[in-house]
Image (cartoon, rainbow, N blue to C red):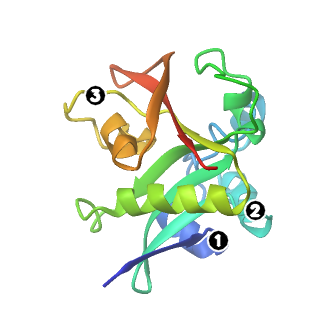
Amino acid sequence: MAIEVRPATRFTDVAAVLGPKRPDANVCWCLSYRIPAKENRALVGTARGEYMKGLCRRKPAPGVLAYDGDEVAGWAAVAPRSETTFATSRKIPHVDDQAVWSVWCVRVRPGHRKQGISHHLVAGAVAFARDHDAPVLEAYPVDNGGERVDPTMAYVGTRALFEAAGFEVAAPTDSVLNGFPRVLMRLDLR
């Protein structure tokens, strides 16, 4: 089947990718970089999912979902950087004052991995940002030099994934994840 990427407006589909097995479990729900740390820590159990449910009702949607036929296969978070904690990060620099968007989480469900879904998700995030008139899209992947990245830490993507989508390294960062440095990569959307 062909992979289709669409805005993440259906909460049940977002929950299939990001939600816990137990509704009251504390999982990220892709909120860690989206909301301030104090608010993020205050949301526990089902409140995290409820927060994401609210985001799915907003415009623009909080990200994009990849579908393999009728089955949701993956998620990518994409939003204006100004609406994320990257806007105030001390570890991820600002290259300029453009109204950039950020893509920071690419997650593929088990059973759909190693099929190129992450490439579809990045392409979908690019299209989504472009459709919302973003001038530039940034990503903050690990620069792993081809080494294996622990699957639980691979959500930020790899430099190679974003290079394949046309992104270029714009700056180093002071952020490290799973022992690998993260780089700031950009794609001009104009």
Residue sitting farthest toward the left: 147
Q: Which is more N-terminal, label 2 or label 1?
A: 1
Compared across the picture, whether 112 is left or right of 141 comes to left
Say which residue appears at 59% left-offset and 74% top-offset. Answer: 12
The image quadrant of residue 2 is bottom left
Query: Residue 141 occupies which quadrant of the picture?
Result: top left
Q: Nearer the viewer, mark 1 or mark 2?
A: 2
Q: Which kind of residue does numbered mark 2 sit on?
A: Pro
Q: Image point 51% across, 63% down: which residue? A: 124
The residue tagged 3 is 144
First reached walking from the N terminus: tag 1 or tag 3? 1
Q: Which residue is mark 1?
A: 11
- Is residue 142 visible in the rendered structure shown here? yes
Q: Nearer the viewer, residue 2 or 132?
A: 132
In the rendered view, would you say 42 is above or below 53? above
Q: Is residue 76 left or right of residue 88?
A: left
Cα gap from disc 2 to disc 3, whole angstroms: 32 Å
The kind of residue on which mark 3 rests is: Asn
